[in-house]
Image (spheres, grey):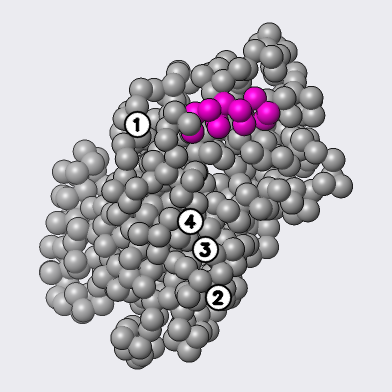
């Protein structure tokens, strides 16, 4: 297996901790003297830069949340003058004021480096054609993959999201070998490819790098079977840098974190205590090399666990499990904690069901209700009504057995539910809190 930066990706862990300590000390000095918000937070805790001597002192430092970025909108947490910021990105702001991130030239170089690692993890090299169907613009996905692809010397096709028929034509005519998009859009493309009438054997796709939304192992198998590719999970968030924070390799046993740049912790989201290795909790990142927007102990709200064992690929970087979900996306229905990914796992075990669904949460007479709308495979939908009812009851029973929660199931025709060319909207919560 190819490794992009063997020096860092395969570094002895003791040596790595020295690198992390040196970089943390520099980062703390940068934020203390250049970011009033952090200086105030540290002074409140009786901390000065001199008290941070190694990575082991990280726990002394305060957490940062998305709300902190919003409270300091737009540029209040930047650690350099705007004259040194060469790129600005921002989140969509769908759940509140958007979060704004800025990059110096060195930050762009770092981003290109970690994305080069990500693409190499997926088996890509300078001989590949990388079709980027993530959105460009303020969203970090498109340009993040773009710079990484150029760094490894691949031929980058910056098609961006949308226009599915054109995506398929270019994929076929240009001979795209690597696809980059959300996993839900990958399934949508697989459906459209089948309908196009062009044989899968006429395409050259070998791998896909998919992220920006949670997806299950069952969904991975569905994508790999339909597109006949290796489906690689990638992880990132714009506040930390964008895509490139972590990526699976071809072994597919966890996502390697570029921890020479992003130091991970797992905490209990309630007590905020750091959890022992192997326990599931909320993922927290400290950026070790960022100049424009360095972040200390940033709470991602993503739930996962870390594995420090050496991977079969030879990389020594810590691996994180696929995210179970987000601590702030967890639904609590009649006292039961539920993540959309748990529902998806049940759906993908049934061949008659398509992986397109919506969860509708409501409150009737002060009681929470949950309805699942899910598409049925076209061939099965044409069967007798009695067979559809049998399928509906079977799915309802499987959900009850697996999740311990009664869910109303509504089967709908294929292609009824809205498709997304970006992040799929799985949950509609109509409750008024």
The vertical placement of 10 against 142, above or below, is above
Does the magenta portion include 286? no
Q: Give whichever of discs 3 and 2 has the lower sequence position.
A: 2
In front of the other: 226 or 277: 277
Give x and y (percent) for residue 6.
46, 50
The tally of labels here is: 4
Splitting the image into 4 quarters, where does residue 9 fall?
top left
* Residue 280's disc number: 1
Q: Image point 16% across, 43% down: which residue?
A: 401
Secondary structure at badge 3 equals loop
Instruction: Locate residue 349 relative to residue 103 in the image: left or right.
Output: left
Residue sitting farthest toward the top: 46
CA separation in Å, label 3 and label 2: 23 Å
Magenta span of residues? 16-27
In front of the other: 428 or 233: 233
In front of the other: 432 or 127: 127
Residue occupied by mark 4: 4
Secondary structure at badge 4 equals loop
Q: Image point 53% across, 28% down: which residue?
A: 18
Observer-side mark, 4 or 2, equals 4
CA separation in Å, label 1 and label 2: 39 Å
What predominant SS class does the magenta segment belong to?
helix
The vertical placement of 35 against 230, above or below, is above
Q: Image point 70% across, 18% down: which residue?
A: 49
The vertical placement of 106 against 231, above or below, is above
Residue 201 in view here: yes
């Amino acid at each position: 297996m190819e490794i992009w930066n063997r020096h860092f990706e395969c570094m002895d862990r003791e040596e790595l901790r020295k690198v992390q300590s040196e970089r943390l000390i520099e980062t703390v000095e940068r934020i203390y003297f250049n970011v009033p918000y952090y200086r105030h937070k540290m002074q409140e805790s009786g901390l000065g830069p001199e008290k941070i001597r190694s990575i082991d002192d990280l726990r002394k430092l305060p957490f940062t949340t998305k709300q902190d970025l919003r409270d300091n909108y737009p540029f209040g947490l930047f650690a350099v003058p705007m004259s040194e910021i060469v790129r600005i990105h921002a989140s969509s702001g769908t759940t509140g004021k958007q979060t704004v991130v800025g990059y110096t030239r060195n930050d762009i170089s770092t981003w290109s480096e970690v994305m080069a690692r990500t693409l190499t993890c997926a088996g890509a090299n300078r001989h590949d054609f990388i079709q980027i169907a993530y959105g460009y613009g303020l969203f970090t996905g498109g340009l993040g993959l773009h710079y990484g692809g150029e760094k490894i010397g691949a031929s980058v096709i910056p098609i961006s999201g949308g226009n599915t028929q054109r995506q398929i034509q270019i994929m076929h005519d240009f001979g795209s070998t690597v696809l980059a998009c959300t996993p839900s859009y990958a399934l949508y493309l697989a459906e459209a490819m089948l309908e196009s009438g062009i044989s899968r054997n006429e395409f050259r796709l070998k791998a896909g790098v998919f992220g920006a939304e949670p997806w299950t192992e069952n969904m991975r198998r569905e994508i790999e079977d339909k597109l006949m590719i290796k489906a690689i999970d990638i992880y990132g968030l714009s506040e930390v840098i964008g895509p490139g924070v972590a990526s699976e390799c071809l072994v597919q046993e966890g996502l390697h974190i570029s921890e020479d740049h992003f130091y991970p912790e797992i905490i209990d989201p309630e007590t905020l205590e750091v959890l022992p290795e192997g326990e599931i909790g909320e993922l927290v990142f400290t950026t070790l090399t960022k100049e424009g927007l360095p972040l200390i102990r940033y709470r991602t709200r993503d739930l996962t666990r870390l594995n420090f064992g050496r991977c079969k690929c030879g990389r020594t970087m810590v691996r994180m499990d696929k995210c179970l979900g987000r601590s702030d996306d967890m639904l609590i229905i009649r006292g039961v904690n539920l993540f959309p990914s748990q529902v998806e796992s049940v759906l993908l075990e049934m061949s008659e069901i398509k992986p397109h669904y919506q969860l509708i949460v409501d409150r009737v007479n002060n009681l929470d209700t949950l309805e699942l709308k899910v598409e049925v495979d076209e061939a099965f939908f044409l069967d007798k009504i009695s067979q559809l009812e049998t399928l509906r009851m079977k799915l309802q029973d499987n959900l009850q057995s697996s999740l311990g929660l009664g869910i109303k199931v509504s089967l709908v025709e294929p292609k009824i539910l809205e498709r997304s060319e970006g992040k799929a909207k799985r949950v509609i919560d109509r409750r008024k809190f």
